[in-house]
Every structure is written in C-alpha cells, then in structure tokens.
Image (tube, grey):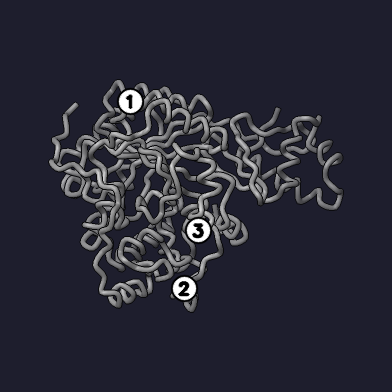
Amino acid sequence: MSLSTIRVFDASAPWRVSPQVSLRDESFGALAYNHDNRRLVFLKSAQLVALIRQLDGYESVNDALDALIPTGQRERYVKALASLVTSEILCGR
Amino acid sequence: MGADTSLRNRFERGLAAPICLTWELTYACNLACTHCLSSSGRRDPNELTTAQAKALIDEIAAMQIFYVNIGGGEPMMRRDFFELVEHAVAQHVGVKFSTNGTRIDAAAAQRLAGIDYLDIQVSIDGADAETSDRIRGVGSYKAARRAMDHLADARFGPFKISVVMTRDNIAQLDAFERLAAHYGAQLRLTRLRPSGRGVDVWESLRPTSAQNRELYHWLLERPHVLTGDSFFHLSALGDPLDGLNLCGAGRVVCLIDPVGEVYACPFVIHDEFRAGNVRDQGFGAVWRESELFKSLREPGSAGACSSCGSYDACRGGCMAAKFFTGLELTDPDPECVFGHGETALAKKRVVLRRVPSPDHSRRVAVAISSR
C-alpha cells in the first residue's frame, strides 16, 4: 500500500477527486472510498458531492466555489474540502 | 467513524448497496473450528461455478460496492480462488479475505503480495497453540503462524490477525497486541456468536460479563484495533466504541453464501433470514427488493428495551445472538451489559434453537498437512 503525499489544502490551487477514490451516490449524499488507504468517508450533502465531482473542470477551488456555491456558504465548503484533503479523498492536480 | 445519529438513522433505512458485503466462497474447509458460524467442512455440490462467481463479481462492481469480504469455509480451497480474486481486483472491487492460513505457503504469499487492493486476515483464537487449537484443531495455530511468517517474508504489508473473543482468550488481549506488533499487523477482534456450530459452544466459551467489561475498556483505549463493529452491544457501558454502533443486517451489511443464497448478515445463515438467491434474481434485485430486507429497514421497535436509558447506545444488540439463543428480536441482547438478556433467557427456559441451518460439517476430523 503506497500512501500518496498529503498536501496542505490551498483553495487557490486546482484539486480533484483522487484517482484512487470511488464515489457512490446515496440518499444522504455519497460514500467515498479510497482504495489505497482503505478509508471510507461519508459525504453528507448532495451539494458537496456535486461540487467535488466538478472540481476537475475549474482552474482552482476558488473558481469552482465562485461558480457553484452561494457566497454565504463558502466557508463551510472550504472547511469540508480541507477535511477531504486530509482523508485523501481529494488530491492536487 | 464516530457515532453520528443522523447518519445512523439513514443507514438504518438501508443504502443503495451494502458497505460491508461478505461472500462465503465455499463451504469446504480443512479445519473444523468448534465455533464455525457457517458450519463449514464439506464443499456443497451446488456452489457457484467460476462463470457464475465472475458474473456476481461483475454485478458487485456495477453496484459500486467498493470491496467484498471473502470467507468460507476456507476460500483458498476453491481451485479458482486466485482467478476470482484477480477478476475482482481488476475491476476495482477490493478483496478482504479471511483465511486459516493453511494454504499460504511461500509461493502463495508471493502471489498474494503482488495483488493490489487485497487485504488478508489470518484467524487464530488464542495467543498460543494450546488455547487456539482447542477451538480450531491441533496444528492450526502453527499453520496460521507459518502463513504469517510467509506473508511477512513476502513483504505483503500489514495483514490482519483475526481473533474471536472467548472466555479463554480475553486474558490474552495484550499478548495478541504484541503478536500483531511483532508482524506489523493489524489486530481484529470479533464477537463470538451462537451461529452455525457456535451454538454448541456459545454457553461455555462466551466471555463472562466481567470479561466483556474488560474488553470494552481495552478497546476504548485502542480505537486502532478493528472489530468489524461487532461489540456495539458493549457501548451501553459508556462512551460508544469506534464504529457505526448499529445492527447493519440487511441495511448496510449482508452475506452471500457459496450456493448464492443471500442472508441478512454473516451470522444468520438460516431460512428465516434468507432474502433470495443471486442465481434467480441477481444480487442487486435481492438487495433492493427482498421483502425481508425491506422489513429490516423499517423503523424497528425497541421492544423490551424501550424503557432502558441505554437503548440509543446499543440499539438492543445483535439480532443473530438473540435469534440463536431463542430470544425474540425485540428482547435484549443475551449479553446485555445490564444483565437484561440473562433475565430474558431465564424466563424463556430456552432450548437453544437448533433449527435447520445448512450444515456442511465434516463427519470426521482431517489432519492439517504441513508445509
């Protein structure tokens, strides 16, 4: 099992769902499973799931947030994304 | 995973596909453990063929089930074992398989070490041969240790050492921890259930209530020790143990047996908990549409436990443990930490429910070949 290098989350950089991760939609949001470190993460919001699925299409997380998330909720999503970096669901690209 | 009430409520209503799918590959086994939950021994002539097994794997992949827990019997007794594992892994379905280790020689260990997305758990039931062999048979501990040595030599990485907790081995918790550290392995401890042949030994082997308390505190201090969420009935003692702390049967968990029957969980191989067969309907249809699973996903009644302040911690405990000791599903867990299960059992003056679980036990014990 090789662990990918954990990077500190920086919203001005481009991120994406790690290629080692599978997402499965569920009524509460989705399950995310990292095949490399065997970690299972519960994504408890459909908006968060939609956001991370689309990260790949934006130059930076900030761009994705500008386009997809109302300003008032931004901080909450930044926090959620940072924790998904820690659990290696997201990786830099 | 911490206890999260809202998420737990969602899980109790069921998921699109299981999180934890166990697939017993064969009823064949070269050991005859006294507590075997699937009463394994002899291969069933009707076991899934290689083609059927591969079709099932394809469906598992399509349902985005991330990994499958393969057991048996001894899964490595199937001649197509590697073929099936490689087929699963090639489609990104991780494999976690449980073995007695007797078939892991140096060559097998090398081959296993070369497969991505593969986890192995080797079973022992004591920290020494004497304790373990009393349950698993003479020579089984030595064989398991030899397998662990081969895996270590092949640089497999951190495999798991899996132990069913009994009255005889709770005193060895620290020794198990040292053994795991010796191999750089992960320790996995699970609950003894009165399932399969386990019904015959449950009364004499189950931990005492004092031992269960000791185990609870030991686990609470060691969240890295894996338990397959199997001790959630002990969470009523105080802080919840790590895990979902719910009975996942038919909601997030289920079992496919070697002949394709789908049961609500690995510990209830019994007609009453049979949801359908993958050969008839395909696995997805059974998971989504079986009447049994639908009923398990209905909000349950707390039954006899409704007046207990700890119901939210233990959710009434394990369905299998109740069923096979003759309790109703609305009764407390037979090992309820407050003793309500003992009271319920005494009231019923129960004869353990020895009803028609499929039994593939061998009629004669077989010696373990040495490698």
| Residue B289 visible in the picture | yes
Residue at 37% in and 45% down:
B187
Q: Name the foreground residue: B50 vs B247.
A: B50
Whichever of callouts 1 and 2 sits on the residue coming sooner in the sequence is 1
Give the residue displayed 41% in from the left and 66% down from the top.
B329
Mark 3 to mark 2 CA distance (whole Å): 15 Å
Label 3 – label 1 distance at C-alpha: 40 Å
- The image quadrant of residue B145 is top left
Disc nearer the start of the sequence (3/1): 1
Q: Looking at the image, which is closer to me, B258 or A3?
A: B258
Q: Which residue is mark 2?
A: B303
Q: Chain of mark 1?
A: B
| Three-letter residue code for mark 3 | Leu
Residue at 13% x, 35% y: name it. Answer: B367
What residue did someone put label 3 on?
B296
Q: Quadrant of residue B3?
A: bottom right
Residue type at tag 2: Gly
Q: Tag on residue B162? A: none
**Label 3: few (<14), some (14–19) or many (≥20) C-alpha neighbours in 10 Å:** some
* Residue located beneath label 1 in the image: B109
| Residues marked 3 and 1, same chain | yes
